[in-house]
Amino acid sequence: MIPLIIVCCYLLMLLGLGAFASRMFQGTSKDYMLASHSIGPFLLLMSIFGTTMTAFALVGSSGEAYKEGIGVYGQLASSSGIIHSLCFFLIGVKVYTFGKKYGYTTQIQFFRDRFESDKIGILLFPILVGLVIPYLLIGVMSAGTVVSNITEGAFTNWFPQYDYGVPPWLASFVICIVVLVYVFFGGMRGTAWANAFQTVIFMILGVVTFYIISSELGGLEAASKTVAEKHPSKLMRSVAPVEQETYEKDFAIWKKLASYNYAVDKKGFSLTPEQKQAAHEKMAPGPPWSLRFRQLRAEAAYSVAQNLLPELTEEEQKVAELSQNDRIVPDPLPENFITMPMSDFPEAAWQPIAKKYFAESIGHPDEEGKMTNKQALGRYRAMRWAPEEPRGLDKWAFLTYLFIPLSVGMFPHLFQHWLTAKSANSFKLPVIAHPIFIAIVWVPCVLVGVWATSAAMPDNPRVALVPPHFNPNGVLAYMVGQLTGDVLSGFLTAGILAAIMSSLDSQFLCIGTMFTEDIAVHYGGKDRFSDKQTVFMARLFIILIVAITYCFSLLEVRRVFTLGVWTFSGFASLFPLILASLYWKRMTKFGAYACILASIGSWIWLFRESNFGKIPDFTYFGMQPVATMIAASTAALVIVSLITSPPSEATLAKFFPTDKKSAG
């Protein structure tokens, strides 16, 4: 209950901050959306950094490091530090200059003027909103997962299906409401102050989290040494031979189990009581809850060793493995059934089966000898499913990750933050400090995820702290909950939520601003609405987007990192649009349209090819999908611009004044 109380107090503090910011609200739409261009260097740094360091950076990076290893840091964090600052300098300063000079509030207003096209907003608005909503989903889902994991056992009788903690759907709902309240009343000023406050909180508590977890695991060197001994592939880009050998051995044992269970269930095969007794005598030791699983493995090994199992066809063996892994077997079987990877087959409803199996052992977390629902599901997966194959990082897939950080150049919420700056000099501090801040946040999160692969229970070194097939989205919160006390756990959870909410608020406000300025006011008539009505419309649309995002969060969950990569890839594919519009005079209106259509078209096609994000390590021609998207959008932009009429002299004079003067 203590962690829950601390989290609730933190949320109340945020509401108080929103109330304070609302008292400074000047009542104008410009103040609500851009804080009247009053944000100085420090506040700009903190708000920009807080906006870019989302649940993707904390929850997602830890989960992905747990699955893929330390190379995750090299994939995104190291390049992000440099590329983000370059974008701030090369794009942010120019955008701010044009925005302040010509009164822009959103990206679309800039693009309309630059390309002399009123209709470009109709094309771009749904695309930007469509990409921001999955971005919002990352935060909303992660907030629910974190709070649910940390509050296990907080209640005596409530929510037993969620291990007597706060349900993820309820936690996500409360977080959405809190963010909505201070954005609703405080606007950009409230958002900037909240971002600054929360950035300080999550950076300080992030360092504290890292120190405590590393101490509990024996220190930085000891924790890393354990990983090197148990899962060395997590510390390198390739797969260690010893780990590959271990996997192949475990997989062979698992295949025997799958064949045995299929033979028993479908072929009427069974061992005699004497044979079972002989098999059980060679059974490996283990905890009481795993007894039946260990017996089945021993029986399978005995049956194979004694050559008792009936011979299975290729199709039967494939069906056996799918059934053992709780996958749905298609009927009829497709032609390429034998060669289809396991990931192509959807999971069956295995959770009720697992809970039923452990029904007598599941109880309150504080009850001695009982396990939680999450532990039951984890243990079921660990004993029944195929071992996870170690994977290395392909060179080209690794290198093409460098394109993903370019997404910051097209983030609409970051565009809006740039326009809040008091002057161009306000960008100096963010450009210099942003890479340092990224390292402070990403290094601990990635290391915690890597350590989670090999950490053992404090009271039983033979039992893994994080069971196999654990949900990557819950790794960070689980490690915090297992290795810290209630008070520290509450504060550290508040720090994680701070990072999540510091991006949600900017995104909510940004979408409300875009709808109001780019759709309602632009097409309804600027003189038709008062400032008060404009602010009201923005607030109304923010409420609608919050509701839509929350409803989506209740649907099927994807890995946070995977969802984030697809979202960022979409924005990155539009990077040529903003870069060329600022630096290439020859870029035309039709070139812009071609770029946008090629970008979203390639994104949709590749997203479908990845089974709508269900394949977490999807590549195209051995590269990240973003490489293909950027190549397509860039080619379309350049080719179409070169074969269509150039912009007017008036537009060139407006956006390239220096070039115009030097030409004369």
Image (cartoon, rainbow, N blue to C red):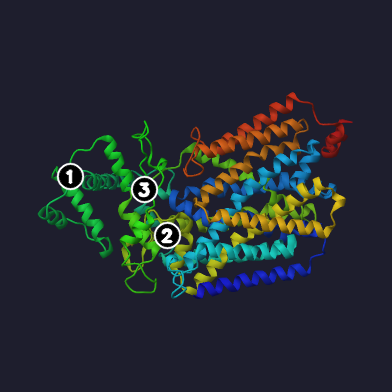
- Residue mark closest to the camera, 2 vs 3: 3
The crowd level at tag 2 (other Cα within 10 Å; few <14, some 14-19, many 20+) is few
| Rendered residue at 82%/63% (across/down) | 27
Q: Is residue 97 left or right of residue 15?
A: right
Report the disc number at residue 304.
1
Whether residue 61 is visible here, answered yes or no, is yes
Residue annotated with mark 2: 221
Is residue 206 visible from the viewing direction of this image? no
Q: What amino acid type is highlighted by mark number 2?
A: Glu
Disc 3 designates what residue?
388
User: Residue at coordinates 83% horizontally, 34% vertically from top-left?
Assistant: 659
**In the structure shown, which secondary structural element does the residue marked by tag 2 occupy?**
helix
Residue reaching furthest to the front: 332
Place of residue 15 in the rendered image (x, y in percent of width and height, measured from the top left): 67, 70
Question: In the shown orientation, is residue 631 left or right of residue 447?
Answer: right
Q: Position of residue 515 (x, y in %)?
A: 73, 50
Question: Gap between marks 3 and 1, in whole Å?
Answer: 23 Å
- Residue 5's mark? none
Instruction: Check the image and name the residue furthest to the left.
Output: 274
